[in-house]
Image (cartoon, grey):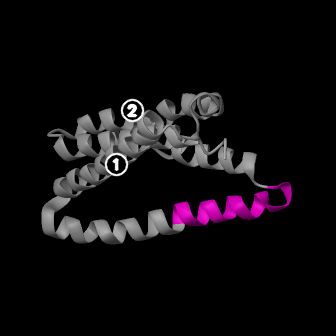
Amino acid sequence: GGLLGLCKLTGTVCALPVWWTLSPVMDRIGIKNVQLICTLFIAVRLYILGVITEPYQALYSEALAGIGGFAAIYGSITVFMGRVVDEDLKGTSQTLIFVFFSGFGAGFAPIGASYVVIAQGIKGMFLLSSYVFMVVVAVLAIFDSIQWLILGNYRSLEET
């Protein structure tokens, strides 16, 4: 229990600066890039959990909990929605975000992951999840790069 508590403490402490700096970072690089960075660090965190050989090494993954976890993902979505949604619908949009994040993400992901654990083991599940997130990052980065460098029509979500 002590190591689990230390992991949660590490993740929480490392997430604190993300909550404070998220809005200015979004102003500089945009929501799409913040989400892409979050997804990259999620992949890194899952990869670490897939290759660790000692339980204390989970602390390395938890040290990335801010940028590759709840603080950056949920925080950036709620800040963005708060900026673009009319005042009358902000409560509804925040509720929908929370339902999607906690209901679908935290509800369906464990069901799917349990099947992978049965087939591949826990390390296999972490590695497969890491690879899936890394492919998503690569595809989106390539797509955005093509729009920006070749087609010249890249626009951030804030500009649309």
Front in this rendered view, residue 160 or 111: 160
Residue on which the image places disc 1: 139
Name the front one of labels 2 and 1.
1
Query: Measured from the top left, where is residue 141 in percent x and y?
Result: 39, 41
Picture quadrant where residue 111 is located: bottom left
Residue 131 can be seen, yes or no? yes
Query: Measured from the top left, where is residue 36 in percent x and y?
Result: 44, 42
Q: Does 97 lie within the magenta span?
A: yes
The local secondary structure at tag 1 comes to helix
Query: Measured from the top left, where is residue 21 in percent x and y?
Result: 61, 28
Query: Measured from the top left, where is residue 66 in percent x and y?
Result: 48, 36
Question: Which span is picked out in magenta?
Answer: 86-102
| Left or right of 136, for residue 117 | left
Of the residues shown, which amino acid type is indicated by label 1? Answer: Val
Is the residue 3 above or below the residue 97 in the image? above
Q: Does 145 lie within the magenta span?
A: no
Of the residues shown, which amino acid type is indicated by label 2? Answer: Ala
Residue under the image location 15 percent in, 61 percent down: 121
**Mark 2 and mark 1: span between their CA atoms?**
26 Å
Residue under the image location 60 percent in, 49 percent down: 77
Residue under the image location 65 percent in, 28 percent down: 24
Residue 8 can be seen, yes or no? no
Residue placed farthest to the front in the image?
151
Front in this rendered view, residue 158 or 61: 158
The local secondary structure at tag 2 comes to loop
Marks 2,1: beta carbons within 8 A: no
What number of labels is visible?
2
Q: Main secondary structure of the magenta part?
A: helix
Is the residue 154 above or below the residue 125 in the image? above
Residue on which the image places disc 2: 63
Residue under the image location 57 percent in, 49 percent down: 74
